[in-house]
């Protein structure tokens, strides 16, 4: 008869563990907290993108530099929290704005000029991604700790 009590006790404890694990998911899946965490991550990564982007210059060969609406990559870094339309998960996007977004690929990876001269890329996005990795982990860990602190 004692074997039956052990099984009942085990089932009861297993049910308690399942409830606890389920409550952990509820604590970290708050949509508002997730968005705030992703905004903080976007802001953090954008700082590194700005740090590693090529510096401003008054180089005369830049045809856009004299135009009234000219913006340098460093002045046009945006970040936004978006929702994937397929799996409904939120993510952060760090990107160039209206005036510089299309230039990021050329500046990062390099390109060929119209006369065939190769222009080396400065890999500012790659460097920013590598430099911000530890900080992003810290932000996520802080978010998870805050979620469990008050529950």
Image (cartoon, grey):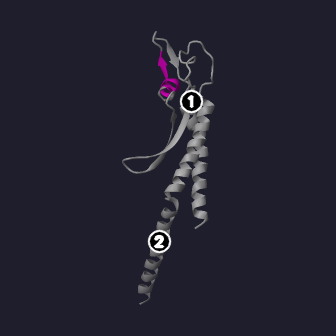
Say which element carries label 2. helix
Residue ID for mark 1 = 124
Asked if residue 91 is positioned above or below residue 103 in the image, the reply reads below
Residue where numbered disc 2 is placed? 19
Viewer-nearest residue: 50 or 121 = 50
Percent across and percent down for residue 68 are 56, 21
Please give the name of the residue rendered at 52% of the width and 55% of the height, measured from the top-left corner.
Answer: 32
- Residues drawn in magenta: 103-112
User: Residue 144, image x and y in percent?
Assistant: 57, 57
The single residue placed furthest to the top in the displayed view is 115
Q: Residue furthest front?
A: 68
128 relative position to 1: left or right: right
Q: Where is the N terminus found, in terms of image quarters?
A: bottom left
Inter-mark Cα distance, 1 to 2: 46 Å
Q: Quadrant of the C terminus?
A: bottom right
Residue 137 sits inside the magenta stretch: no
Marker count (numbered): 2
Crowd band around label 2 with a 10 angstrom C-alpha radius: few (<14), some (14–19), many (20+)? few
- Please name the predominant secondary structure of the magenta segment in the image: helix
Q: 133 and 150: which one is in front?
A: 150
Residue under the point 43% across and 82% down: 8
Specify whether residue 104 is painted magenta: yes
When asked about the image quadrant of residue 53, the answer is top right
Q: Is residue 110 above or below residue 51?
A: above
Q: Is residue 98 above or below residue 44?
A: above
Residue drawn at 45 percent across, 79 percent down: 12
**Does residue 23 lie above or below 41 as drawn?**
below
Nearest to N terminus: mark 1 or mark 2: 2
């Amino acid at each position: 008869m004692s074997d039956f009590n052990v099984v009942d006790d085990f089932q009861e404890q297993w049910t308690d563990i399942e409830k606890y694990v389920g409550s952990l998911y509820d604590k970290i899946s708050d949509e508002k907290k997730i968005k705030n965490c992703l905004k903080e991550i976007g802001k953090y990564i954008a700082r590194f993108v700005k740090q590693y982007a090529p510096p401003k210059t008054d180089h005369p060969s830049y045809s856009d530099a004299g135009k009234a609406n000219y913006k340098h990559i460093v002045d046009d870094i945006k970040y936004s929290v978006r929702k994937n339309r397929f799996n409904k998960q939120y993510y952060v996007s760090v990107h160039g704005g209206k005036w510089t977004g299309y230039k990021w690929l050329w500046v990062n990876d390099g390109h060929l000029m119209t006369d065939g001269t190769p222009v080396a890329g400065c890999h500012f996005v790659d460097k920013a991604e590598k430099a911000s990795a530890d900080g992003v982990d810290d932000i996520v860990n802080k978010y998870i700790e805050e979620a469990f602190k008050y529950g």
